[in-house]
Image (cartoon, rainbow, N blue to C red):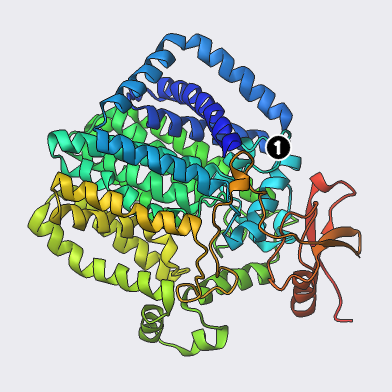
Amino acid sequence: MLLILISWFYIIFLTINLGVLLDKLAQLKNTNFIIYSILGLFTTTILASIWAIFGRINIEFHVFLLFLNILLFFNFKKKVLVIYKSFYTDLQSLQFSLKILLSTIVVLIIAQCATVPYLIDNESYYIQTIKWINEYGFVKGLVNLHLFFGQVSGWHVTQSALNFSFLYSNFNDLSGFCLLLGTIFSIQKLNQYYKNQEINNLIIGLLPLYTVFFFQFISAPSPDIPVYIFSFVLFYYFLENLKKATIEGFNLILILTLFILYIKSTAISLVLIPIILFIINFRLLSKNIGKTIGLSLTILILFVTKNMIICGVPFFPTKMFEAIKMDYAVPKSIQYFYSDQLNYYGYFVDMNQYNSMTATDLFLRWLSLPKMNGLFNKISVLLVLIVPFFIYKFQNKKGFWIIYTLMLVQLITLFLTSPQYRFLLNYIFFFLTFSLACLIQNKKTITFLLYFSLIPTLIVLFIPINLNRFSNNKFMLEVSTFDFNNIIYPYKNTKNNTVFRSIHLGNLIYNSPVDENFFWSNGNGDLPCVNKEQINYFEKYFHIIPQMRTTNLKDGFYAKTISDE
């Protein structure tokens, strides 16, 4: 815990300085401490992404980042100190009940981050993706080694830049830092609601109600957490700017949107927010169109460049833009296989079942899925039905109708690709809190609900719970709990004590986990690392094996077609 806290203080120092730089460049005129830190995370991500194109994110990058931050601090010293003082004043102005609530949640977040990483995705590709970036940067054709490496998220680039791998190997908790920022921002807005009764402040102020859910993601660098947190912030500023748009507000909304999309492209419906705002306020915002286009193109170019290097195609695993590819691109047959599997997975069916079912059959199958999947699927349909009533009766404003429409767009998009509930949770959480805010606006009741929500959080943190009745995934049956041995040092970045063996295949020597029954598992093995079962599967059914392009791992991999023999 203590080491995590120290690292977060340093991350705050870095992100505030870089946030001030971006604020100046984009002329945002921001006054909120948390927004400065988010802007700093965005700037760090851009810098690290550019660096990773040419080399590893390691000690040399941190020397550059530290030197840059020292220059920025002394250049903007007066402004930076004002930001810290203003933040301290904001915390001091919180009502006593909110101070206790915030302090409690902060301690619990740090404690959860020090626990055993729970997410199975951490074992399949988070650890290895970040390790590849730390040791080599973006590697050509890396997706040919493991399909999940094609999902390199902007958040994993950020984590690679802020995990200090050259000093310590157990920092794996940037999502926890993100939740910390979101919690502070929401408590600030709730404190404002108690003063001005603005419904937008209440909606985001209720974000801590979901802390128990978020806790299952923050001991690993899950890209889902920043999508959920930043979406709330984005919705808040969108609603505020729809009343009275400003160039500064629009620029902030654009940055938040681009950051979310660079983290997780499945949040594609959010791109409509700045587009709609721009159209509505075209006369005002067209004066700023140069910066809008420039910033958008920067992120698009980085996104495509990252994919062209790692996957050999501009977008993965989509079937679009097939003509644009590198010689080491993932084979079309495997790309189609992976894309189709994502669709089947959303309905928990195989290919034959999927092809034999009508659209109605698939919808009913999706709606009737057991456990957590079925629960959130039913909630999403319920919200589609009841939210228009709540908007019309309680908050009949254009902004809420627009966000509701975007939820429908996102839901339709998911049905056409991969209808997994977690890709809709930012909308589900927003409209759940919106509905609650329409019904409950009493200060004492709100405070009671927020404190009461900490009870399941405490239970999950300290008492082992078997998730068999909630989850369909047999590899996610027990949540991680806090161990007092981790008060100073966090748990290592993997939950497994996996033994690896070295395997020789053509010109490739790779490490494979021994006695690992999870097909996609990698764990924390030395590079290159991939499960032998995967290699054998694609060799047997697709007649393809991964091979090194040269004798240097930095030069990456290609897919070699072998004969039937």
How many residues crowd around disc 1 within 10 Å: few (fewer than 14), some, or many (20 or more)?
A: few
Residue found at x 68% / y 48% = 309
Residue found at x 80% / y 51% = 527
Note whether 318 is above or below 100 in the view shown: below
Mark 1: which amino acid? Tyr
Residue 432 pos. (x, y %): 26, 59
Residue 307 pos. (x, y %): 62, 50
- Residue 290 visible? The answer is no
Q: Quadrant of residue 181?
A: top left
Q: Residue furthest bottom?
A: 356
- Residue 197 visible? The answer is yes
Residue at the disc numbered 1:
168
> Could you tell me which secondary element the residue under label 1 belongs to?
loop
Number of marks? 1
Note whether 58 is above or below 333 in the view shown: above
Residue 548 pos. (x, y %): 84, 55
Note whether 499 is above or below 48 in the view shown: below
Which quadrant: the N terminus?
Answer: top right
Residue found at x 46% / y 26% = 19
Q: Is residue 508 left or right of residue 79?
A: right
Residue found at x 47% / y 24% = 16
